[in-house]
Image (cartoon, rainbow, N blue to C red):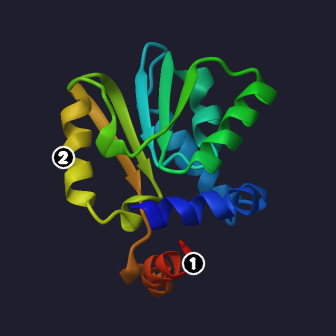
Amino acid sequence: MSNDKAFWDRIARKYAADPIADEATYQHKLEKTRECFTPDSRVLEFGCGTGSTALLHAPFVKEIIATDLSDGMIEIAHERAAEAGVENVRFQAIDVADLAEPNESFDVVLGLNVLHLLPNRREVMTQSYDLLKPGGVFITSTACLGDGMWFLALIKPIMRLFGG
């Protein structure tokens, strides 16, 4: 896992500067996700990257805990939250497996564009289910190799090669 962390720390600023490739689809996903929120919702987002999605969802919920393995990504997320004046998102640089939240703590768990990068995705999905309150919702949006995204299979070896 340390190689993955080193990779994401190193590219965090470049990642933050890159525009969203398909803005219309991103906005649609935001809208669909918000259908699961209430003003009292407590939300967990793991693999939050630079925090953009968490910050956009913040006005619609009570609280978001947004985690990412990369200190570099979380540093940028803190900067963006301060610039936006958002106070109901708590960013943490932590592996989701190490999250110290009791079971049934969240109304919604988000794992967006991250499951395909995790070596322990089954464990993380089980943990996500355990963290949900009864009736809670786990939302994921993950690239599938069968959808013409075959090149994503190259990401993990490249991350390891340049991860240090």
Residue 36 in the image: above or below residue 30: above
- Tell how many labels: 2
Furthest-front residue in this view? 164
**Label 2, residues with CA under 10 Å away: few <14, some 14-19, many ≥20:** few
Point out which mark residue 162 bears. Answer: 1
* Circle 2 SS class: helix
Q: Residue at x 75, y 63 (%)?
A: 14
The picture places residue 5, in percent across and down from the top left corner, at 50, 58
Which kind of residue does numbered mark 2 sit on?
Answer: Thr
Foreground residue, 161 or 29?
A: 161
The picture places residue 84, in percent across and down from the top left corner, at 77, 27
Say which residue label 2 marks.
126
* Circle 1 SS class: helix
Which kind of residue does numbered mark 1 sit on?
Answer: Phe
| Quarter containing the N terminus | bottom left
Point out which mark residue 74 bears. Answer: none
* Quarter of the view holding residue 107: top left
- Residue at mark 1 to residue at mark 2: CA–CA distance: 30 Å
* Quarter of the view holding residue 82: top right
Direction from residue 130 to residue 44 in the image, left or right: right
Q: Residue at x 61, y 57 (%)?
A: 9
Q: Residue at x 53, y 45 (%)?
A: 48
Direction from residue 30 to residue 99 in the image, left or right: left
